[in-house]
Image: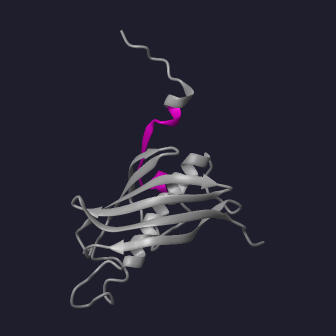
Amino acid sequence: MTDSTQTASDVLTQSIDMDIHEVMRRLPHRYPFLLVDRVLECVSGKHIRALKNVTINEPFFPGHFPHRPVFPGVIILEALAQTAGILAFVTAGVYPDEHRQLYFVGIDKARFRKPVEPGDQLILKATLERSIRGIWKFSTIAEVNGEEACSAEMMVAPGETRK
């Protein structure tokens, strides 16, 4: 016989997943700059694993590059920042709105290991390293087929909303 009661720490460490509708509740971004299609796993205060399907229909592919489309590295970094942002909002227990936003404020040790092309699935991972006075620091990795395509240390912080 198993005990079906949950402690508060069990609830905080439960993994959740999110479809695109929940992702859109957790991020203020919209097309063409919403870069997270699905959250596969998210553990508040710990880590997140999300998915970005890379399609030939992305608006930058005709120019980057016409002879060989490559997903821009800065866009991969933005997708990782959005993934980290979801984890920060989930951990804080809040949703973004016109008064509550998080901004990408820092990046260190960014590395690009392999090109990402149309048809690839990017697995976006972020681990919360620390949160001090509202500044959240994450280690992030983007993978394709289990191989690292990009990694970086990132920081996000709350920002003031202009009136």
Asked if residue 19 is among those painted magenta in the image, a careful observer would answer yes
Asked if residue 46 is among those painted magenta in the image, a careful observer would answer no
**Image quadrant containing the C terminus:** bottom right
Image spot of residue 147 (x, y percent):
23, 62
- Which segment is the magenta one? 11-23
The image quadrant that residue 15 belongs to is top left
Q: How many marks?
A: 0
Image spot of residue 109 (x, y percent):
43, 71
Image spot of residue 4 (x, y percent):
44, 17
Q: In this picture, is 122 found above or below 58? A: above
Outermost residue to the right: 163
Residue at 28 percent across and 88 percent down: it is 65
The image quadrant that residue 36 belongs to is bottom left
Using residue 94 as the reference point, say whether residue 10 is left or right of it: left
Closer-to-camera residue (35/150)? 150
Residue at 48 percent across and 46 percent down: it is 46
Outermost residue to the front: 109
Residue at 49 percent across and 29 percent down: it is 10
Q: In this picture, is 19 found above or below 113? A: above
**Image quadrant containing the N terminus:** top left
